[in-house]
Image (cartoon, grey):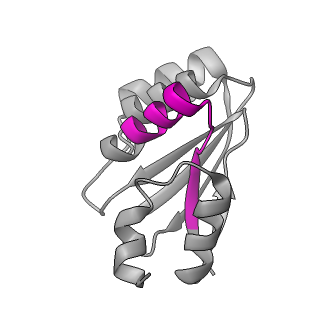
Amino acid sequence: MTTEANEERHYEVNTIEDLTAIADQLQCTLYKGKANELLLDLDDEGTMVNMDVRNIVHEKFKILEEVSWTSRRGGRHIVLTLGTELPPPVRIGLQAALGSDPKREMLALWEWQMAGTDTISLFKPK
């Protein structure tokens, strides 16, 4: 499979093993989210975190740390470490509300609902 095909396919896979293999082919590492982390995929420089929602998340769940890096396509990936663990559907909803890629979040929710698979993750360039 070509790299271009893999870039499209990463929205369709539903296992961490598949995502890890794709990340390797794209010369990235797979950052797998933890139960106390929100992973945001902001597609381009113009996409901003919804600060009103971020303030609510901080008030309700206590944001302890924020780490970010530039994605392969020039956007930003952000990891928010929270003071509490949350189940995948809640994390996915919060990520979407904060401005993360809506297609990514919808498919993560679908994978959780249909297969019980938590694929909340980000590609990180090596």
Would you say residue 96 sits in the magenta stretch?
no
Name the quarter where the N terminus is drawn: bottom left
Magenta residues span 105-123
The answer to which of 74 and 7 lies nearer the viewer is: 7
Residue at the far left: name it. Answer: 46
Side of 54 where 82 appears, left or right = right
The answer to which of 107 and 41 lies nearer the viewer is: 107
What residue lies at 41% left-to-right and 25% top-to-bottom? 53
Would you say residue 114 sits in the magenta stretch?
yes
In this orientation, does residue 73 appear? Answer: no
Measuring from the top left, give residue 57's x and y in whole percent: 53, 23
Name the quarter where the C terminus is drawn: bottom right
The answer to which of 30 and 36 lies nearer the viewer is: 30
What residue lies at 67% left-to-right and 23% top-to-bottom? 86
Measuring from the top left, give residue 25's x and y in whole percent: 56, 82
- Residue 25 lies, with reference to residue 82, above or below; the image says below
In this orientation, does residue 35 appear? Answer: yes
